[in-house]
Amino acid sequence: MTDHPRFNRARNPKRALYDEATVNAILDSGLVGHVGFIAEERPMVMPMAYARGPGCIWLHGASKARIVKLADEAALTMTVTLVDGIVAARSGFNHSVNYRSAVVHGKGRAVTEPEEFEAALKAITEHLLPGRYAEIRPMTAQERKATGVIALTIEAASAKVRSGPPVDDASDYTLGLWGGVLPVVTALGRGIPDGHTPQGASEPLSLARARARFSN
Amino acid sequence: MTDHPRFNRARNPKRALYDEATVNAILDSGLVGHVGFIAEERPMVMPMAYARGPGCIWLHGASKARIVKLADEAALTMTVTLVDGIVAARSGFNHSVNYRSAVVHGKGRAVTEPEEFEAALKAITEHLLPGRYAEIRPMTAQERKATGVIALTIEAASAKVRSGPPVDDASDYTLGLWGGVLPVVTALGRGIPDGHTPQGASEPLSLARARARFSN
């Protein structure tokens, strides 16, 4: 991404504050998070489904997954990045990417208390498909056993955002070159029913809600 | 993401092999990578621009960025994830995400040799905008100093892919519910010129090449 100090909020102390509204808006607009942890002294980064919980991020994994087996209190982080455009400048140096990124740091905690476990699973499913739980059958006890949920307790969070046109050196503007932004769009299409869906069944409402949430 | 063993290649030993062609195709289709490293005993995950080099991944950062200052031989990892769809099943348990993900593990190395440094910067810019270097002015010595490039020497890499419709429990198919996939599409639009671009200047060819590379 851009590392130009003008746009890197993390390197501008005034903008590196925990801006909860910005962080939450990015988390709500992301499809998957990239979760970082340490295993055998190596950094690991896994794409995971997630949802915002109270003071935490809920993460979903199989009960046998390595991350679910991490010790309680293990250091965890999650980064969610939305790419909005490729910034084409007049020099290689000023090329950049328009993006919104949220980083959450904290500790892991296994979610075992039944009420939180149910809330977390519902929230993780409905992060992607808002309202989906009312459209499907309930979870079985066997499925609960095969599912692991961990909470990333939020200790710190921050956002970085770069937007707008390239910022070129003043002398480069006179070169007569094309400079601007190539927009990157993420959009959800129409749902594609599988072969077991009754003929003529209409698309569930949760899919339209997802389209509204994720289209930029 | 799905952690259901039927779809998680990493947990199926037959499919967890280093499949170089699959890994490279995913790396070539990703806009940004999520780079993991350890700083002060904490996991860190940063979105970064990247490019494939010989036996390595080149990563771009400001010369003052924390990751550029990591010790040579520091453990690094990068994950690139392409989200293709939201899989709406008939139970919460069988919900999933269609995605292609590549994970690269290795060690960091500062790129200082001039020839590799130039090649890396060009490759990183042209990963996003193929052919862009021929359209812009050359880099200055001052810009070189302000730019850090690191190589992630590849020690291991793997891919995970989930595609296709939901796989529901047999009894759930008779519930009369809608099941299927909500496609997630990433597409690049038309370039938006900034106010310093000459009137009527046509969009550079590198933007069309980027659209061809990244649209799924």
Image: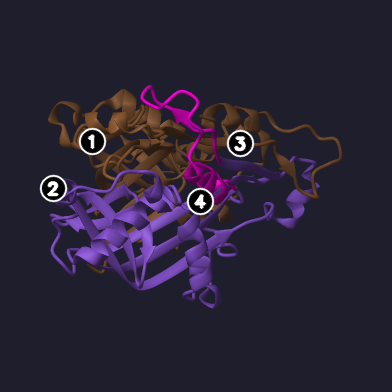
Chain colours: A brown, B purple
Q: Using the image as rendered, state which of residue A21 and residue A110 is in the foreground.
A: A21
Q: In 3D space, how far apart are the residues under numbered discs 2 and 4 (Cα atoms)?
A: 30 Å
Badge nearest the viewer, 3 or 2: 2
Query: Given the current orientation, which residue lies at the most extreme right position?
Result: A199
Looking at the image, do the residues carrying marks 2 and 4 touch, with CB atoms under 8 Å apart?
no
Residue drawn at 75 percent across, 56 percent down = B170
| Residue plotted at (23% across, 36% down) | A8
Badge 3: how crowded within 10 Å, few (<14), some, or many (20+)? Answer: many
Closest to the observer, B187 or B3: B187
Q: Which residue corresponds to the image point at 48% horizontal and 58% vertical from the top-left?
A: B28
Q: Amino acid at mark 1?
A: Asn
Please tell me whether residue B139 is drawn above or below residue B14 in the rendered image. above
Which is more foreground, mark 2 or mark 4? 2
Q: In this rendering, does residue A108 appear at all?
A: no
Classify mark 3: helix, strand or loop: strand
Dot 4 corresponds to which residue? B82
Q: Is residue A50 left or right of residue B50?
A: right
Residues under numbered marks 4 and 3 in contact, where contact means CB atoms less than 8 Å apart: no
Reading the image, the residue beneath label 2 is B64
Q: Please name which of the two marks, 3 or 1, marks the residue nearer to the observer.
A: 1
The subunit carrying tag 3 is A
